[in-house]
Amino acid sequence: MAYKYVFGPVLSGRLGRSLGLDLLGGRICSMDCVYCEVGATRDLTLFRKPYVPASDILGELAAWKDEGLAPPDMITLGGLGEPSLNSEMPAVIAGARELFPDTDVAVLTNSTLMTDPSVRTELALADVILPSLDSLVKTEFDAVNRPCAGVDPMDVAHGLMAFRQGFKGKIFLEILLVEGVNDTDANLAKLTEFCKRLTPDRVDVVTTTRPGTVRGTRPVDGAILSRWRMQLERGKEKNCPTATSNLEALSLERVTALVGASLVRRPQTVPQLAGALNVDQTMVRQAVEALVKMGDVVSREDRGETFFHGTGHVLEG
């Protein structure tokens, strides 16, 4: 079947082979980050509702399981927008755990809704939470994340602290740096103090590696990135999977569908797709070329590599 809300697996250094669940079905988010790899936010909002019914998402997940593929290392709620905006997120977490009782459930979040106690309670149902917080300097936060009106980074930080107090799972904090925007010493000092108080299980400091929403958004140089990593990073065990799946036995048509669903959510190169799906690069390249001809995928050159990204037609079909 063609999946609208299940995508991947995607190879993740933090989560292994991560099978994604898109809870929004569109670019709906509480931020419009300049570096976002899925494109500009179409609906900038803090309003929660069942953007995609849990039954639709779990129906697809059950169908994916019935294909007999190797189980993923993690089931990750994320996709095209902020997953906690979907008010049926708790049902999705519970349903995913019922379908895959031996697989942990993770949630990628921009942390903006952590200010809401009910959202904190819902997120605590997951096994792993991957929040982001790119700056505690208000002007930098606004510039790099472009949030909904009224979102303040200190309020977000306090929400994360409150969440930490009652959460029994793991927290993997991510900080993404953009050259000349949030790479200041003031931000480093504030985030250093915050991380000491939050005590996340893991901290990852990264910079832009894929095409973002705003052209000209640049990664920080190696010296700055190294300095931030030395001061902030912790808990970075190798978490890359070695298990194989039977995806390589699938037809070109099936691989094309999987590649198309994955590229709608994340720009990737052919080698990255092949590694995540455990499919020969030749077959992946054939799938990408077919999607480009159909107008479902476009290519972008970025720092010497060719990235492919879905146009959205895969979701609309």
Image: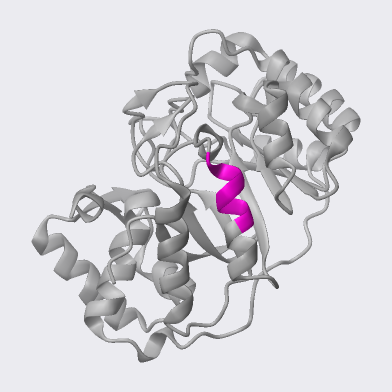
Residue 264 visible to an observer of this rendering: yes
Taking the view exactly as shown, the residue that stands out farthest to the bottom is: 249
Residue 136 visible to an observer of this rendering: no
Q: From the viewer's perspective, is 38 left or right of 223?
A: left
**56 and 208: which is toward the camera:** 56
Quadrant in the picture for the N terminus: bottom left
Q: From the viewer's perspective, is 151 left or right of 58?
A: right
Reply yes or no: does residue 179 show up in magenta. no
Q: From the viewer's perspective, is 139 left or right of 10?
A: right
Q: Give above or below for 75 relative to 159.
A: below
Percent x, y of residue 243: 61, 83
Q: Going 73% across and 35% down the picture, which residue do you hit?
A: 121
Percent x, y of residue 199: 88, 38
The image quadrant that residue 174 belongs to is top right
Q: Going 47% across and 50% down the picture, which residue do you hit?
A: 54
**263 and 42: which is toward the camera:** 42
**Number of numbered discs:** 0
Q: Going 81% across and 50% down the picture, which residue do you hit?
A: 169
Quadrant in the picture for the C terminus: bottom left
Q: From the viewer's perspective, is 169 left or right of 297?
A: right
Please report the bounds of the magenta region as a residue range.
Answer: 88-94
Q: Main secondary structure of the magenta part?
A: helix
